[in-house]
Amino acid sequence: MRPEQITAEALKHTNGDRYLLSAGVAKRVSQLQSGAKPLVPTEKMEKSVDIALKEIAAGLIEIKA
């Protein structure tokens, strides 16, 4: 899936609220950098931001307002 498709899919889980999405991504990135295991398959040297977006787009991470 292309990056813009991943972002569009992730936005569906926040009702199009980009601020809420960015806050959710930031929180998940912090968790990943603190040692949390990714919930989606990752590629070598993939950035935490990309992993977090993929997890949200897949519906594996719930973002609450």
Image: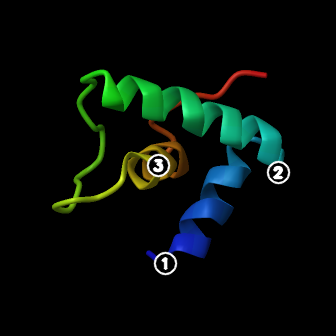
Task: Return the residue nearer the eye: 36 or 30.
Answer: 30
Residue 17: x, y in percent?
83, 44
Provide the residue designation for mark 3. Answer: 49
- Let me know if residue 15 appears in the view: no
Q: Describe residue 10's horizontal placement relative to residue 38 as left or right.
A: right
The residue depicted at 53 percent of the width and 43 percent of the height is 56
SS assignment at label 2: loop
Residue 64: x, y in percent?
70, 22
Residue type at mark 1 is Arg
Q: Earlier in the sequence, mark 3 or mark 2?
A: 2
Residue 63: x, y in percent?
64, 28
Q: Residue furthest bottom?
A: 2
Marks 2 and 1 close (CB-CB < 8 Å)? no
The residue depicted at 38 percent of the width and 49 percent of the height is 51
Provide the residue designation for mark 2. Answer: 16
In this view, 45 is above or below 52: below
Residue type at mark 3 is Val
